[in-house]
Image (tube, helix red, strand yellow):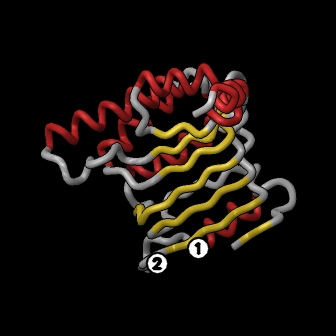
């Protein structure tokens, strides 16, 4: 890379704003430093090879993720977007503990969740609802889930997209409760899918 390109890249904080949980601690600190005060797009994904590893390695990788979150909570006011991929329930439980100690995520405006979570999972519901409590300005929510049980929608939602995969609504889905939540949202919903 030429010196000029390097200098231009180093001078643009927005080039350093996409932060993945797969970053090593030194790379994470470098991105946080170089991004200045710009808003952050946080990508929470299982650390590489988490599912194909022996249990002791899985535990180590879960610890790395928890350490990542602990570092990111310190700059919680800079979060603007949060994208969450599928995790194991015990990891979600630990992430929720870290998140509950966080300051307000005052600038978090967009949350997207992918994977075939089952929201009947107490751990996922706790994690998702903790995000809603900490972030008072979420206006865009995109979910790709198995079920909507225990989902609490933030009242600030303006864009809502929910894809339900392989759901068995049966007795687990509270349709009237979900409709009631939609009706309690203050302001105009611009997009509902």
In this rendering, the answer to whether 83 lies above or below 136 is below
In this rendering, the answer to whether 161 lies above or below 150 is below
Q: Residues within 10 Å of mark 1 (few under 14, many from 20)?
A: few
Q: Residues within 10 Å of mark 2 (few under 14, many from 20)?
A: some
CA gap between label 2 and label 1 equals: 9 Å
Q: Which of 10/88 is in front? A: 10
Image coords of residue 49 (percent x, y): 26, 49
In this rendering, the answer to whether 103 lies above or below 120 is above
Determine which quarter of the picture holds residue 98: top left
Residue identified by numbered label 1: 175
Comes first in the chain, label 2 or label 1:
2
Looking at the image, do the residues carrying marks 2 and 1 touch, with CB atoms under 8 Å apart? yes
Horizontal side of 76 relative to 98 (left or right) equals: right
Image coords of residue 184 (percent x, y): 76, 58
Residue identified by numbered label 2: 169
SS for tag 2? loop
The disc placed on residue 10 is: none
């Amino acid at each position: 890379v030429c010196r000029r390109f390097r200098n231009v890249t180093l001078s643009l904080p927005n080039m350093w704003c996409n932060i993945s949980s797969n970053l090593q601690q030194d790379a994470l600190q470098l991105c946080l430093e170089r991004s200045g005060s710009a808003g952050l797009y946080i990508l929470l994904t299982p650390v590489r090879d988490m599912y194909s590893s022996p249990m002791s390695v899985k535990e180590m990788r879960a610890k790395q993720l928890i350490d990542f979150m602990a570092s990111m909570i310190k700059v919680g006011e800079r979060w603007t977007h949060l994208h969450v991929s599928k995790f194991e329930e015990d990891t979600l439980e630990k992430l929720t503990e870290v998140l509950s100690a966080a300051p307000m995520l005052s600038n978090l405006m967009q949350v997207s969740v992918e994977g075939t979570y089952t929201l009947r999972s107490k751990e996922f519901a706790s994690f998702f609802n903790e995000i809603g409590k900490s972030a008072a300005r979420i206006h865009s929510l995109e979910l790709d889930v198995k079920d909507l049980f225990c989902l609490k929608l933030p009242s600030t939602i303006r864009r809502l997209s929910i894809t339900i995969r392989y759901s068995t609504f049966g007795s687990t889905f509270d349709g009237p409760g979900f409709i009631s939540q939609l009706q309690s949202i203050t302001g105009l919903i611009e997009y509902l899918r």
